[in-house]
Image (cartoon, rainbow, N blue to C red):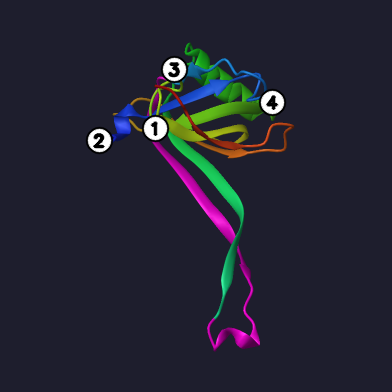
Amino acid sequence: MGVKLGHEAKLYYCAAGIGGTPTWTEVPGVRNLKLNNSRGEADVSTRGGGGWKATVGTLIDAVIDFDLVYDPDDAAVAAIEGAFFAGTLLGLAAMSGPVAEAGSRGLWADCAILKFERDESLEQPLLVAVTAKPTYSANVPQWKVIEGS
């Protein structure tokens, strides 16, 4: 077992969503990506709790935030930009390695692209800050662990 480095992780998209057997395309222009997974909370405190507050986790909230080098000729950039402006879903897989590699793990979800913010700093490439979240879909988000030998 070894340490995984950030540059080994991969982001993929599938315009048709995650249903069936998705055909994944890598998003090569990703710079920094953060997959934020957290749970909501419900207070289940009772008088029998000895004066301690008790909490249980509820629904999982997932947020995929990433920076993308803006290349309008890149199909991945076009797909993400198109999903944002059309308000359509886009299947995303934020994986710890290649999507078909045994042991790779991450979130697969049909997502709404909620932010497509372009940074035009003078001495930097055009960058786009993107936020995606799982959206209403027939396909339930999944935490995938790729099995294999």
Q: Quadrant of the N terminus?
A: top left
Circle 4: is it few (<14), some (14-19), or many (20+) Cα within 10 Å? few
* Horizontal relation, residue 9 to residue 5: left or right: right
Most extreme residue toward the left is 2
Q: Which residue is mark 2?
A: 2
* Horizontal relation, residue 91 to residue 67: left or right: right
Give the spatial CA distance, label 4 vs label 3: 19 Å
For marks 1 and 3, the one nearer the N-term is: 3
For marks 4 and 3, the one nearer the N-term is: 3
**Magenta stretch bounds:** 28-52
Q: Nearer the viewer, mark 2 or mark 1?
A: 2
Q: Secondary structure at mark 4?
A: helix
Q: Which residue is mark 1?
A: 96
Q: Which residue is mark 4?
A: 86
Q: Amino acid at mark 4?
A: Ala
Most extreme residue toward the right is 138
